[in-house]
Image (tube, grey):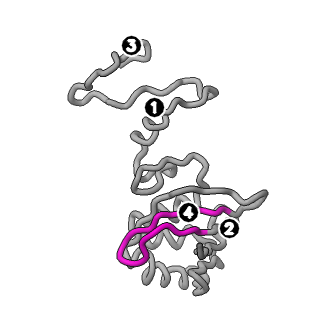
Amino acid sequence: MSGSEQTPHGHIPESGESSIPELEVDENIAPRPEEEVADVARAEPSDPLWVGHDDRFMRSIPPPIAAFIDATNRGDSDAFVAAFTEDGTLDDWGRVARGHEGIREWDRTDNIGKESHFALVDIAEQAGSDTYLVHLQVTGKGFNGTSPFRFTLRDDRIASVQIVPD
């Protein structure tokens, strides 16, 4: 369909025709709600903007945090570990995994090894830093529920993650 054609309200797409509305060309105009929905519908699981099983689409999520979530959801342990700096740490309620080998072991016993799946609930940058408080809905064969994670980033990787008690 060309940009000048209008789709009548209530139009039912034919086989092979996209049911996703076209987006505004001018990116200076704030997106309409239906455009945000269209962005989600167009996103692919490999897209760095695709986050969580509920198709939540976040433009502001830093790439290392997106990689942490995406690698877990794909069951990709190598990508999960690669999201961290060489000296990265992961603090799971006081049990600390250090460096790539320690993080790989935690991943094996408590994350991908438990078939965990993360869905982003919200994210907030802590004032003037590379630290973010992220709430994730966790499901799988281990912990199930919403949990806050505090990420500190360095050199486009995760320097530390702390799973914060509520």
Query: Within 10 angstroms of label 3, few (less than 14), some, or many (20 or more) residues?
Result: few
Give me the C-alpha separation between circle 2 and circle 3: 48 Å
**Which residues are drawn in magenta?**
132-149
Along the viewing direction, whichever of 137 and 104 lies nearer the viewer? 137
Local SS, label 4: strand
Q: Which residue is mark 1?
A: 34
Give me the C-alpha separation between circle 2 and circle 4: 14 Å
Q: Amino acid at mark 4?
A: His
The N terminus, quarter of image: top left
Q: Which residue is mark 2?
A: 152
Q: Are marks 2 and 4 in contact (CB under 8 Å)?
A: no
Q: Which numbered circle lies on residue 117?
A: none
Query: Within 10 angstroms of label 1, few (less than 14), some, or many (20 or more) residues?
Result: few
90 part of magenta stretch: no
Closer to the camera: disc 1 or disc 3? 1
Instruction: Please name the residue shown 53% across and 58% down the image.
Output: 66
Q: Position of residue 139 (x, y in %)?
A: 40, 68
Query: Within 10 angstroms of label 4, few (less than 14), some, or many (20 or more) residues?
Result: many
Give me the C-alpha separation between circle 1 and circle 4: 25 Å
The C terminus, quarter of image: bottom right
Q: Which image quarter: residue 113?
A: bottom left
- In primary-sequence order, the first of circles 2 and 3 is 3
Q: Which numbered circle lies on residue 5?
A: 3
Q: Amino acid at mark 3?
A: Glu
